[in-house]
């Protein structure tokens, strides 16, 4: 070993001097490192997308592995998902034609493990069982009380023990989760852990999970009194959407889901905002059931859910692992996790998100990004959707604390998504404490449920 007495930059040059890029080529079942671009051009050889970089300095050798991982998953909107004639639930996730053919020919009996929210089981459990019976599938249905308070590792372990007892083929027998966001998040985490990654399918039964929890890659449970502190970024192999589940959902939970639709509207789609303004109440009344079927795509329920999912996928697909910290989909999620956990179970997820968005509309207006009229249009729309716009436990101390947490976990920048009009937004790092304070004061003055101004806001002629 030699000791260099060169300058810092010389040392740096030395460290980088011998860097070799290797492609990986497969020849007859074995992978070989090859240099040069033409490495894999020969017949019968396969080129991996992975690369190995070898660096040699005088005193060390290192290998840097770059191995791209591709996730492919399907979000499928279907009708009558639980009708025995519908293939989706058993084979909608399969892309390989040979595998599909094997299923259709019925050579092997299929096996499916289903975790279902207890309440959903009371409503739809028989239909799920009848479906698998009719299709001659070997199945086990595990109903669980998947509530926010039970969203924990204990529940994950319970699922894993049952999955293990039942026995599934890790490659071909996906675990199916049927329920709201809590159930989907817990089962997703259990599947991510079982044998390091077992495929799973999401069947959302709440509006919130239909447009939000089921389209991305995140799984998780609460830990140390923090929301979703433990989790993975492993998408399901497929999500099967059927809006008919929503007809049994309590009204408050429909409002809850509308909050996440409103988030996408405010961030990305003025048309969606206007649709919610005009037909939000109607959607709430009719529980998102359309009369014209899926094919028409023209009624408010089909249109709003479709745009919400499309805009959500646009933001999620390029950033599945959330490496980019500047995310518009974080709107409403800066303060709400702290508020939601503090008052648990008083506020539903979407309600806490809405309170956060409501305060942020005030911050936007205080910064001159929104006009007073636009701000009130947003608040009025929220109230029409029967969402809370203010909460006594959302104190300035909580807001400041949540934002300083955000700073710590977002690379030292606030990355605050704010509406810059109706249906447009940008991310800001420079909201001063003074702006925050003024916006908060105004927010409390105007929206405090005991204050006199609420009815004025509702009655304002803003056209
Ligand atoms: N993974 C993600 O990207 C993501 C995104 C958003 C939210 N989430 C998570 O989702 C959770 C909230 O989801 P949620 O709002 O669906 O809550 P939830 O899962 O608690 O379901 C709400 C309630 O509705 C009941 N229910 C479900 N479907 C029903 C139906 N069809 N008819 C009647 N009752 C029904 C449930 O039993 C439950 O009581 C939170 O934990 C949140 O962290 C995750
Ligand atoms: Zn959310």
Image: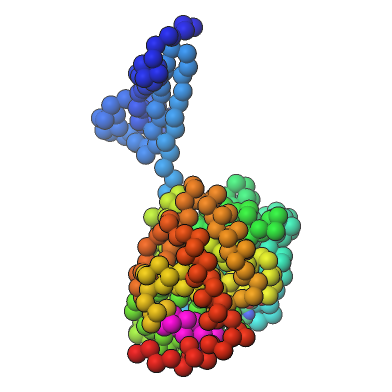
Left/right placement of residue 150 relative to residue 100 reads right
Residue 133 horizontal/vertical position (percent):
63, 74
Residue 176 occupies quadrant:
bottom right
Question: In which quadrant of the rendered view does residue 58 lie?
Answer: top left
Q: Residue at x 47, y 51 (%)?
A: 413
Q: Residue at x 50, y 58 (%)?
A: 217
Residue 76 in sight here = no
Task: State the extent of the magenta-drawn residues as a range.
Answer: 376-388
Residue 378 painted magenta:
yes
Q: Tell whether 43 sits left or right of 313.
A: left
Q: Nearer the viewer, residue 382 or 217?
A: 382
Q: Quadrant of residue 125?
A: bottom right
> Left or right: where does residue 291 sit relative to residue 148?
left
Out of 323 and 28, give the one closest to the viewer.
323
Let me know if residue 258 appears in the view: yes
Query: With respect to residue 245, does 222 lie above or below?
Result: above
* Total numbered circles: 0
Image quadrant containing the C terminus:
bottom left
Q: Position of residue 94 (x, y in %)?
A: 46, 60
The structure residue drawn at horizontal position 68% and vertical position 70%, both measured from the top left corner, is: 343
Does 271 lie within the magenta span?
Answer: no
Front-most of residues 146 and 285: 285
Q: Main SS of the magenta segment?
A: helix
Q: Position of residue 117 (x, y in %)?
A: 66, 72
Q: Residue at x 48, y 55 (%)?
A: 414
Residue 40 location (% of width, % of height):
30, 32
View extreme (top): residue = 2
């Amino acid at each position: 070993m030699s000791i260099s007495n060169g300058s810092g930059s010389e040392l740096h040059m030395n460290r980088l001097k011998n860097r070799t890029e290797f492609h990986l080529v497969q020849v007859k079942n074995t992978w070989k490192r090859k240099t040069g671009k033409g490495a894999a051009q020969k017949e019968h050889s396969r080129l991996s997308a992975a690369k190995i970089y070898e660096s040699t300095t005088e005193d060390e050798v290192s290998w840097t592995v770059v191995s791209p991982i591709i996730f492919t998953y399907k979000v499928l909107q279907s009708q009558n998902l639980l009708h025995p004639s519908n293939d989706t639930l058993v084979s909608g996730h399969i892309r390989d034609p040979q595998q599909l053919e094997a299923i259709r020919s019925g050579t092997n009996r299929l096996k499916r493990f289903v975790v279902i929210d207890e309440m959903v089981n009371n409503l739809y459990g028989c239909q799920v069982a009848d479906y698998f019976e009719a299709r001659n599938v070997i199945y086990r249905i595990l109903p669980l009380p998947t509530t926010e308070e039970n969203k924990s590792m204990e529940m994950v372990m319970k699922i894993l023990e049952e999955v293990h007892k039942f026995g599934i083929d890790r490659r071909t027998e996906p675990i199916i989760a049927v329920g709201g966001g809590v159930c989907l998040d817990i089962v997703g985490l259990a599947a991510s852990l079982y044998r390091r990654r077992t495929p799973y399918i999401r069947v959302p039964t709440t509006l919130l999970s239909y447009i939000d929890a089921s389209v991305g890659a995140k799984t998780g449970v609460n830990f140390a009194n923090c929301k979703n502190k433990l989790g993975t970024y492993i998408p399901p192999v497929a999500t099967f959407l059927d809006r008919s589940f929503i007809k049994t959902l309590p009204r408050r939970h429909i409002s809850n889901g509308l909050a996440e639709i409103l988030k996408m509207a405010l961030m990305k789609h003025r048309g969606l905002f206007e649709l919610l303004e005009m037909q939000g109440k109607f959607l709430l009344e009719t529980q998102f059931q359309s009369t014209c079927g899926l094919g028409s795509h023209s009624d408010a329920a089909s249109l709003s859910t479709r745009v919400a999912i499309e805009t959500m996928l646009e933001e999620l697909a390029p950033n599945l692992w959330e490496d980019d910290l500047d995310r518009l989909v974080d709107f409403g999620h800066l303060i709400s996790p702290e508020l939601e956990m503090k008052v648990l179970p008083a506020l539903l997820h979407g309600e806490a998100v809405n309170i956060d968005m409501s305060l942020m509309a005030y911050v936007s207006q205080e910064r001159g990004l929104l006009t007073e009229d636009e701000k009130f249009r947003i608040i009025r729309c929220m109230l029409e959707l029967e969402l809370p716009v203010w909460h006594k436990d959302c104190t300035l101390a909580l807001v400041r604390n949540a934002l300083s947490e955000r700073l710590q976990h977002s690379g030292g920048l606030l990355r605050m998504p704010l509406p810059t009009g109706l249906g447009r937004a940008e991310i800001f790092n420079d909201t001063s404490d003074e702006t925050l304070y003024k916006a908060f004061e105004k927010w409390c003055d105007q929206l405090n449920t005991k204050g006199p101004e609420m009815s004025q806001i509702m009655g304002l002629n803003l056209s």
